[in-house]
Amino acid sequence: MNITKDISPLTEFKRDTARLIAQIKETGRPQILTVNGKPSVVVMDAAAWQEMQDQLEHAETVAGIRKGLMQAHSGEGTEADQFFDSLTQTK
C-alpha cells in the first residue's frame, strides 16, 4: 500500500471515480476512502478481493486440519470405525 496514493477522501472519489477505479485496477491495491479524515470504507478490484477470500479460506482450512491433527495426537476424538459404527446404531 502506498499511503500517499491509496488513501482518498470520499468526496475526491466521487469527483474522480473513473481515475481512481483505473488506478485500483492498474495497481491491484485497494483504495481507502475517508470521511471527515477517518478511514471509512475500502474499495478494491473484484479479482483482488476474490484472491483475498481464497487465501482466507485456505488459511482457515489449514488451521482446521492442524487443530484436528493436534487433537488426534493428544488422544482426543473417536476412531473412525467406532464413529461409523455409532452412526449405524442410531438409525
Image (cartoon, grey):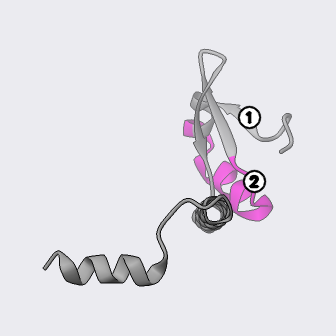
Mark positioned earlier in the residue sequence (2 or 1) = 1
The span picked out in magenta is 14-30
Q: CA distance from mark 2 to mark 1?
A: 11 Å
Residue 30 lies, with reference to residue 55, above or below; the image says: above
For the residue labelled by badge 1, is the local secondary structure a helix, a strand or a loop? strand
Give the residue pinned by disc 1: 7
Residue 75: x and y in percent read 61, 61
User: Residue, x 64% and y 54% (percent of image)?
Assistant: 21
Q: Amino acid at mark 2?
A: Arg
Residue 68 lies, with reference to residue 37, above or below; the image says: below
Residue 59: x and y in percent read 67, 61
Q: Which mark is residue 29?
A: 2
Would residue 2 appear left or right of 42 to someone viewing this image? right
Residue 87: x and y in percent read 26, 78
| Residue 27 on the magenta segment | yes
Q: Main secondary structure of the magenta part?
A: helix
60 vs 19, nearest the viewer: 60
User: Residue, x 22% and y 84% (percent of image)?
Assistant: 88
Q: Quadrant of the N terminus?
A: top right
| Residue 64 on the magenta segment | no
Specify the farthest residue to the top: 36
Residue 28 lies, with reference to residue 38, above or below; the image says: below
Q: Which mark is residue 68?
A: none
- Residue 73, located in which quarter of the rendered image? bottom right
- Residue 4, located in which quarter of the rendered image? top right
| Count of numbered badges drawn on the protein | 2
Would residue 83 appear left or right of 18 to someone viewing this image? left
Q: Amino acid at mark 1?
A: Ile
